[in-house]
Amino acid sequence: MLPLAGLVMALFALMAGIRALPLLRGARKPTGIAVGGITISSIALALSALATAMQLYLMDEYSAYTECLKGAGTVSSQGECFTQFRDAAQRKLPADVLDVLGAIQP
């Protein structure tokens, strides 16, 4: 649920920056910080939206991974759980997505 929280926080920051911009212009104050905040929050909003979408798309695979970890008593069995998760994600995602994402690490 953390990407969803990031989505809400980035949206809040974007709205605050947009609301501050005309106030700063009206007071004839520098707007650089507000513009920087809008830029950074826009990027954070896009990344959070992508992470939330990915989390929702892979929800079944992640749930299976979590259940597997509950029963894994050794490091090697935890590694086996991750391998199963990675393989399931590779079947569901286009071939090059995991390469772009840095080959999902636990």
Image: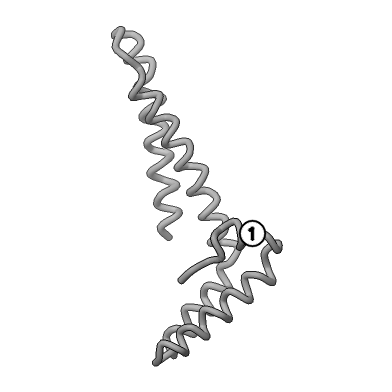
Residue 53 point in image, percent of width and height: 57, 55
- The residue carrying pointer 1 sits among few (fewer than 14), some (14 to 19) or many (20 or more) residues within 10 Å by Cα, namely few
Residue 11 point in image, percent of width and height: 43, 39
Q: Residue at x 53, y 66 (%)?
A: 104
Q: Residue at x 45, y 42 (%)?
A: 44
Identified by mark 1, the residue type is Val
Q: How many marks?
A: 1
Q: Residue at x 36, y 24 (%)?
A: 34
Placement of the N terminus among the 4 image quadrants: bottom left
Residue 73 point in image, percent of width and height: 39, 92
Say which of 54 and 75 sits in front. 75
Judged left or right of residue 83, residue 27 is left
Judged left or right of residue 2, residue 51 is right
Judged left or right of residue 89, residue 51 is left
**Is 34 situated above or below 58?**
above
Tag 1, which secondary structure? helix
Judged left or right of residue 14, residue 104 is right
Name the colour scheme: one colour
Placement of the C terminus among the 4 image quadrants: bottom left
Residue 29 point in image, percent of width and height: 29, 11
Residue marked by disc 1: 97
**Is 15 situated above or below 97?**
above
**Is 81 situated above or below 49?**
below
**Is 60 situated above or below 40?**
below
Q: Residue at x 45, y 47 (%)?
A: 7
Q: Quadrant of residue 22?
A: top left
